[in-house]
Image (cartoon, helix red, strand yellow):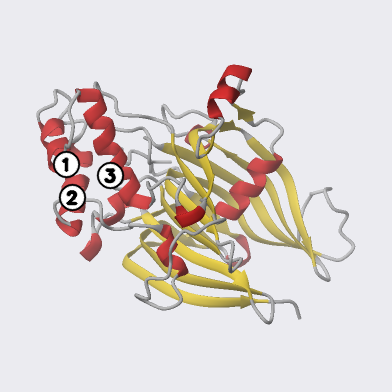
Amino acid sequence: MKGLNKVVLVSAITALSSSAHAELTVLDDTQMGQMTGQSGLSIDLEAHVSIGEVAYKDGGFITMEGIKLGGAGIVGVPGAGTALDNITIEIDVADAGGTGVSANYGIAGIVNQLVADFDAGEGTTGSTVADVVAALQASPQVALNAQTISVLMAHQAITGAGGSNEVSSIASLLESSLGAGDGVIEDGDLVIHVTGTDTWDETLAMKSGVDFGLQVGKVALRTSSYAVGTGGAANTVLVSGINMAGKLGPVDIIIDESTSKLAINAYFAVAGGNNIDGGSLGASELNAMTFDFMGVSIGRFAMNNSRGANAGANLGFAHAAAVVSASSKGLLIDVKDFSADMDMQGITIGANSIGDMYISDLEVTATMDVYGH
């Protein structure tokens, strides 16, 4: 979908930038010539990422080992590919007046693009979310689209007739105070928009989105004498057997030229959930992990926005929004919003099951000042 797209953001971006297997679309001279004078750059990405070890040394070490990032197929989701693909990265630097950048931010961007793609596919103009829902309800694939229909209807009920008002612009995260109105894209600001490449499909009448799979063999503590990269047994394993599958929604990033602040607005679902493409991910054998040092394991972990008071908001995606900047001590992370529903099923302590845990309508705001000591 031209609005659905990719999180685990810091590790994913770091891994993608270092991947030896990333495939970028090659532009010939004609295409390059056509880009002259356009407002930005678009990159279609397909990647397989594998990292043997990431080691952080303070006195001793903490290591992350056996890292793999790709499509949901790497953790066994039926019918899913193993490549992290269907991703388009749009890069713009605003000019005077903040113009020359895409206006398709966040969930508003998904909904607006969905309606625009519908118009293009159907040869119509000026359609609304209600028109898209009506077309899906009249489609021969109505049963296949039932969840998409319900989510769009819930989204419209929350946001109004237009169904696209939840996030008008990531720039609002940069406001100096709530409602100040000074969070705007200005001359020289860098704007990065990560989205899905898919467009409207008249047959399926829905989007496939950006599926991801993440594996981490283990996170372990090691002594100061550890030889980096040698792996092997560790006395204390914090977490092991992480196998995650999910969907990525839009990810927007702004670096403000005048303040050097970085704002990020990201939507995602772990183990599928009630998102726009049906949320089929989440079989019981997926999204497991073990906290070895506590003797605790989780058989299935899910994170989305599919129930409670906000069911259907953000098209069913969990949401994270934050501003990162330098502080007098080090690095300031201002979490503007983290909202999600969480499932932890098949919890065991030792060899005994203690049941399941469900958290609905989790909402967090916080500030973190990170510095050395």
- In which quadrant of the rendered view does residue 136 lie? top left
Give the mark, 2 or 1, whose residue is nearer the N terminus: 1
Dot 1: element = loop
Residue 249 or 55: which is nearer the viewer? 249
Tell me where residue 306 appears, x and y as whole percent: 27, 54
* Mark 2 Cα-neighbour bin, 10 Å: few <14, some 14–19, many ≥20: some
Quarter that holds the C terminus: bottom right
Residue 205 visible, this orientation: no
Residue denoted by label 2: 162
Which labelled disc corresponds to residue 190?
A: none
Asked if residue 213 lies left or right of residue 235, the reply is left
- Horizontally, residue 43 falls left or right of residue 211, namely right
Label 1 or label 3, whichever comes before in sequence order: 3
What is the spatial separation of the Cα atoms under label 3 and label 2, in whole angstroms? 9 Å
Amino acid beneath label 3: Val
Query: Looking at the rendering, in which quadrant would you find the N terminus?
Result: top left
Asked whether the viewer can see residue 153, the reply is yes
On residue 128, the disc is: 1
Task: Identify which residue is drawn at 60% across, 25% down.
Answer: 32
How many C-alpha atoms fall within 10 Å of the one at disc 1: few (<14), some, or many (≥20)? many
Q: Position of residue 101 (x, y in %)?
A: 46, 46
Mark 3 vs 2, N-terminal side: 3
Give the quadrant of residue 265: bottom left
Q: Mark 3–mark 2 contact, CB under 8 Å?
A: yes
Residue 358 position (above or below residue 268): below
Between 5 and 115, the one nearer to me in the picture: 115
Secondary element type, mark 2? loop
Q: CA distance from mark 1 to mark 3?
A: 9 Å
Check disc 3 and report the residue beneath it.
111
For image coordinates 53% across by 53% down, the residue present is: 289
